[in-house]
Image (cartoon, grey):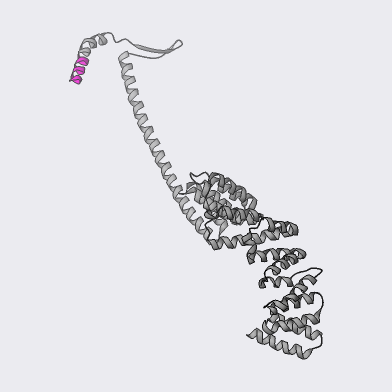
């Protein structure tokens, strides 16, 4: 209804004003300075403007078509590049697994930006770069991988792993500390300290970590016990190297009573003393332990002592011959101690008594050698044959 009304109004206006416009058409003059450039009637000018409007519309339509074709072309080229990136990424991964690290790094770094998982591709490129010995480029790839959303923890852990493989323990420690601040109580982070502290020779910190973070390390009790013992062994060696008194103070003040009673820790202490030429402290510790509880596993450490005066130990062992039920082990220890004091005849006597009930191939070899030096060839041959029989059995 409204449309019909508008059409009627337009037709009525045309009937009224059309004669007037046809009688008084007027004209349009376009000039520049004193020169007329264009002149026409107003009606013709209106038709020209209308025609120009439609020409502009057609030009706009054509331009849109051309631009649309350009975007399609760009899209096709972009898809082609993406397909090429996926292919190169796959080939790079395969090259990395095959050990062709130079080719792997080239393909992975080239395709990472357009791959389906850029962060993972950059991480693989970092692994290849490290194997090529280029640590600076490795760090650049890891920095690019870290830009991916939600990748900070994963990239950080990979960084620590690669730094540990390259024995960059201090750098790995700094990286791990930052991760620990941002992701506290993470099992993977805590477990990474187990590799860093030994590399830094920080055995006391490793022991503290084992005691405070046992639940987060993901290890069984047996594995934790073995790791703790190893840490104490290395710590004892470190302290003994610096000072025997330093190790002695640590043993007396910092080691728990339960550990002091355990044989592996006693042996670790003695090994540290002996290896670092702290024979006096080792002798004092041995005498104290043997006097309290005559422990057979500690006797072999008597042979390893390097001290100036063996008399207190020899006197103690000679008393044990009268009351100990392990006289064969005592004779064996006395033989080696007598030998250290150049008492070969006494050493031979103790060795003869020892091998009667404690046949030992190395003891037979030593006994045979000592008897030959003394000119007792028949006895030497006898114990040589017994040694062979012991070796066969």
> Could you tell me residue 289's position as x and y percent?
69, 67
Question: Which quadrant of the structure image shows residue 68?
Answer: top left
Residue at the front extreme?
323
The stretch drawn in magenta includes residue 3 = yes
| Total numbered labels placed on residues in the image | 0
Question: Which quadrant of the structure image shows residue 325?
Answer: bottom right
* Residue pictured at 75% horizontal, 67% vertical: 283
Q: Is residue 75 visible?
A: yes
Question: Measured along the vertical axis of the image, is residue 111 above or below residue 96?
Answer: above
In this image, 246 relative to 127: left or right?
A: right
> Could you tell me residue 201's position as x and y percent?
67, 56
> Could you tell me residue 343's position as x and y percent?
81, 78
Image quadrant occupied by the C terminus:
bottom right
Question: Measured along the vertical axis of the image, is residue 152 above or below residue 368?
Answer: above
* Residue pictured at 76% horizontal, 65% vertical: 279
In this image, 269 relative to 343: left or right?
A: left
Image quadrant occupied by the N terminus:
top left
Residue in the foreground of this view, choosing between 150 and 269:
269
* Residue pictured at 47% horizontal, 55% vertical: 90
| Helix, strand or loop: magenta stretch | helix
The stretch drawn in magenta includes residue 117 = no
* Residue pictured at 57% horizontal, 51% vertical: 159
Residue in the foreground of this view, choosing between 128 and 360:
360
> Could you tell me residue 361's position as x and y percent?
69, 81
Residue at the bottom extreme?
378
Residue in the foreground of this view, choosing between 62 and 292:
292
Q: Is residue 243 visible?
A: no
Question: Which quadrant of the structure image shows residue 355?
Answer: bottom right
Magenta-drawn segment: 1-11
């Amino acid at each position: 209804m409204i449309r019909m009304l508008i059409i009627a109004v337009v037709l009525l206006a045309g009937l009224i004003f059309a004669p007037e416009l046809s009688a008084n058409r007027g004209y349009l003059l376009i000039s520049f300075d004193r020169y007329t450039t264009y002149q026409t009637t107003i009606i013709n000018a209106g038709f020209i403007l209308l025609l120009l409007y439609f020409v502009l519309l057609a030009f706009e339509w054509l331009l849109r078509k051309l631009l649309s074709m350009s975007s399609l072309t760009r899209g096709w080229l972009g898809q082609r590049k993406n397909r090429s990136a996926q292919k190169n990424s796959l080939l790079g991964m395969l090259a990395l697994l095959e050990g062709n690290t130079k080719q792997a790094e080239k393909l992975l770094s080239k395709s990472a930006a357009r791959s389906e998982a850029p962060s993972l591709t950059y991480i693989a490129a970092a692994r290849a770069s490290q194997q090529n010995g280029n640590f600076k480029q490795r760090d650049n790839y890891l920095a690019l991988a870290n830009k991916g959303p939600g990748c900070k923890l994963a990239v950080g852990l990979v960084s620590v792993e690669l730094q540990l493989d390259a024995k960059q323990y201090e750098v790995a420690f700094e990286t791990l500390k930052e991760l620990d601040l941002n992701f506290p109580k993470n099992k993977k982070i805590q477990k990474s300290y187990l590799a860093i502290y030994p590399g830094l020779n920080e055995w006391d910190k490793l022991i503290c970590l084992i005691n405070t973070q046992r639940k987060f390390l993901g290890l069984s009790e047996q594995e934790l016990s073995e790791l703790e013992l190893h840490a104490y062994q290395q710590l004892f060696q470190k302290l003994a190297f610096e000072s025997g008194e330093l190790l002695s103070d640590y043993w007396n003040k910092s080691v728990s009573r339960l550990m002091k009673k355990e044989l592996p820790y006693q042996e670790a202490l003695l090994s540290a003393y002996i290896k670092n030429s702290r024979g006096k402290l080792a002798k004092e510790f041995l005498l104290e332990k043997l006097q309290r509880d005559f422990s057979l596993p500690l006797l072999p450490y008597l042979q390893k002592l390097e001290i100036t005066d063996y008399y207190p130990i020899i006197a103690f062992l000679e008393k044990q011959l009268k009351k100990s039920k392990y006289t064969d082990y005592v004779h064996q220890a006395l033989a080696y101690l007598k030998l250290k004091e150049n008492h070969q005849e006494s050493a031979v006597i103790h060795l003869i008594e020892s091998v009667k009930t404690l046949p030992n191939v190395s003891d037979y070899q030593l006994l045979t050698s000592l008897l030959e030096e003394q000119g007792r060839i028949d006895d030497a041959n006898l114990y040589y044959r017994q040694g062979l029989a012991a070796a066969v059995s």
